Image (tube, rainbow, N blue to C red):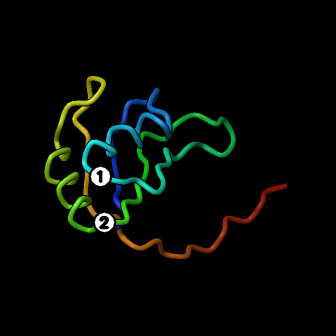
Amino acid sequence: MNIYVGNLSYKMTDDDLGKLFKTFGSVSESKVVTDRDSGRSKGFGFVEMPDQAEGEEAIKQLDGKEIDGRNIKVNVAKPREDKPRRRQRY
């Protein structure tokens, strides 16, 4: 199950995000999305949990919970839509 996590603290790391969800079961991957140019967090990420029931419990328990001073948003991730790439300006 792929889970979207929004409104994250900008200091949250991939490992921090994984540890947060490991209390509910196994985590196969956790990733905080970063800006390609600056490398800074964009304030959201994704967690992959192989067990559906564990993922649903994590969503139920963590959605709206305050983590590092921010109320995080947690829900099932929507499939990524392929967007046309922006053209490079010269």
What amino acid is at disc 1? Gly
| In front of the other: 24 or 9 | 24
Residue at 35% x, 56% y: name it. 4
Q: Where is residue 68 drawn, in percent x and y?
A: 30, 24
The image quadrant of residue 37 is: top right
| In front of the other: 37 or 22 | 22
Q: Is residue 25 above or below residue 84?
A: above
| Numbered circle sitting on residue 25 | 1
| Numbered circle sitting on residue 54 | none
Residue at 56% x, 43% y: name it. 34
- Determine the residue located farthest toward the front in the rendered image: 26
> Dot 1 surroundings within 10 Å: few (below 14), some, or many (20 or more)?
some
The image quadrant of residue 46 is: bottom left
| Numbered circle sitting on residue 51 | 2
Q: Earlier in the sequence, mark 2 or mark 1?
A: 1
Q: Where is residue 72 drawn, in percent x and y?
A: 26, 40
Q: Where is residue 85 drawn, in percent x and y?
A: 66, 69
Q: Where is residue 6 drawn, in percent x and y?
A: 33, 46
Q: Secondary structure at mark 1?
A: loop
| In front of the other: 10 or 47 | 47
Is label 2 in contact with label 1 (beta carbons under 8 Å)?
yes
Q: Secondary structure at mark 2?
A: loop
The image quadrant of residue 19 is: top left
Residue at 37% x, 65% y: name it. 50
What amino acid is at disc 2? Asp
> Dot 2 surroundings within 10 Å: few (below 14), some, or many (20 or more)?
few
